[in-house]
Image: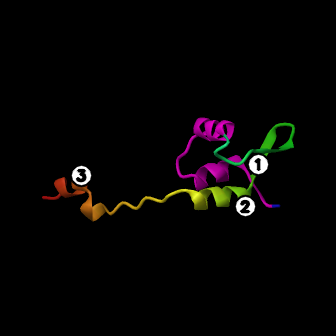
Amino acid sequence: MSLIRLPELLALLGGVGKTTLQSWEAKGNFPKRIRIGERAVAWDRRAVEAFLASRPTVTVNCKDDPRKQAARP
C-alpha cells in the first residue's frame, strides 16, 4: 500500500483546505486517514486517486472568459 502525506494530498486536491478535507472525511465523502504514528497520518494513494477520478472536472477556456476579453485594449 502506497501512502500519501498531507502536504502532497493538499497539492493534489488543488487548493482544498484542511477544514474542507476534514469535513469530507466526516461525511464519508473522502477516504479515511490512516494513523502511521503518534502524531502522523496518511491516506491510501489508490483510494485518493479513485476519489479524484470520480470527481467531475472543469475546464476554463480563457479565450471565452468575459473578464479576459474586457481587459483587452
Q: Around disc 2, counting alpha carbons within 10 Å, would you say few (fewer than 14), some (14 to 19), or many (20 or more)?
A: some
Residue tagged 3: 67
Q: Which of marks 3 and 1 is nearer the N terminus?
A: 1
Which quadrant is the N terminus positioned in?
bottom right
Q: How far apart are labels 3 and 1 at the CA level? A: 40 Å
Q: What's the mark number on residue 23?
A: none
**Nearest-to-viewer mark from 3 and 2:** 2
**Crowdedness of circle 3 by 10 Å Cα count: few (<14), some, many (20+)?**
few
Measured as percent of width and height from the top left, residue 71 is found at 19, 54
Residue drawn at (25%, 62%), measured in percent from left and top? 64
Secondary element at tag 1: strand
3 or 71, which lies in front? 3
The residue indicated by pointer 1 is 42
Q: Earlier in the sequence, mark 3 or mark 2?
A: 2
- Label 2: element kind: helix
In this view, 28 is above or below 68: above
Q: Percent x, y for residue 18?
A: 62, 39
User: What's the residue type where badge 2 is placed?
Assistant: Arg
Q: State how far apart marks 2 and 1 are (Cα).
A: 12 Å
Residue type indicated by callout 1? Ala
**Snapshot quadrant of residue 35:** top right
**Label 1: few (<14), some (14–19) or many (≥20) C-alpha neighbours in 10 Å:** some
The Cα–Cα distance between marks 3 and 2, rounded to whole angstroms, is 38 Å
Residue that numbered label 2 is attached to: 46
Residue in the image at 24% along x and 52% along y: 67
Q: Is the magenta stretch mostly helix, strand or loop?
A: helix
Residue type highlighted by circle 3: Arg
